[in-house]
Image (cartoon, rainbow, N blue to C red):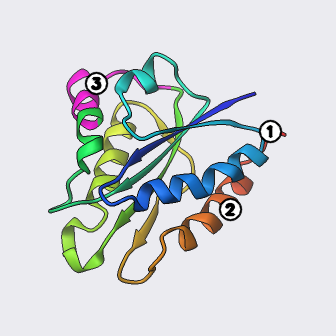
Amino acid sequence: MPMLKIFVGTMYGGALDVAEQVAPLFEAAGYETALLEQPTLDDLTEERPDLALFCVSTTGSGDFPGNFVPFARELDERSPSLVGLRYGVIALGDSSYGDTFCGAGRRLDEMLEGLGALRLGERLEVDAMETFMADDAALPWAEEWIETQQLKVA
């Protein structure tokens, strides 16, 4: 059974809620899933998943949430080759912050692509100014992502 790892970067629990809500969709599609609330780079490089999904909220001026900072820092400092890694990004933000809207998700996406990983489809950017419950946007996106990227294995 292929492995999907969901890497969670959250400050107040919104990204974790999204991860918990979308995980069953991937399980129904034939994946074993693991939610990583304190992800390490080894979670991505030593035991590489068949598919990775990053659910990341943005804090401050486009910053990563505290629980995700060590992962992002290690990714930046070690710069491992991620060629062959397929991934998706659900970025949570607040458009009232202007240029830094979804800054953490956008920056992570750039970092992953720069290391050779392949994003499947478009990044989902959820705006707290428009969507009160992020999973209202994430669930339909995940269903469509599984379908359009032909990720179903079961």
Residue position for label 1: 153
Residue position for label 2: 144
Q: Is residue 55 above or below residue 94?
A: above
Check disc 3: other Cα within 10 Å, few if <14, some if 14-19, many if 20+. few
Q: Amino acid at mark 3?
A: Ser
In the rendered structure, the answer to whether residue 113 lies left or right of residue 139 reads left
- Badge 3 or badge 1: first in the primary sequence: 3
Q: Amino acid at mark 2?
A: Glu
Between the C-alphas of marks 3 and 2, the distance is 31 Å
**Where's residue 112, x and y in %?**
38, 38
Name the residue at the left extreme: 61
What residue appears at the point 31 percent right and 63 percent down from the top-left corner? 102
Name the residue at the right extreme: 154
Q: Which residues are magenta?
A: 72-83
What residue appears at the point 27 percent right and 37 percent down from the top-left corner? 72
- Badge 2 or badge 1: first in the primary sequence: 2
**Where's residue 27, x and y in %?**
73, 44
* SS category of the residue bearing label 3: loop
Q: Quarter of the image for the C terminus: give it.
A: top right
Residue position for label 3: 79
**Where's residue 130, x and y in %?**
42, 83
Image quadrant where residue 100 sits:
bottom left
Name the residue at the top extreme: 46
Foreground label between 3 and 1: 1
Q: Are marks 2 and 1 in contact (CB under 8 Å)?
A: no
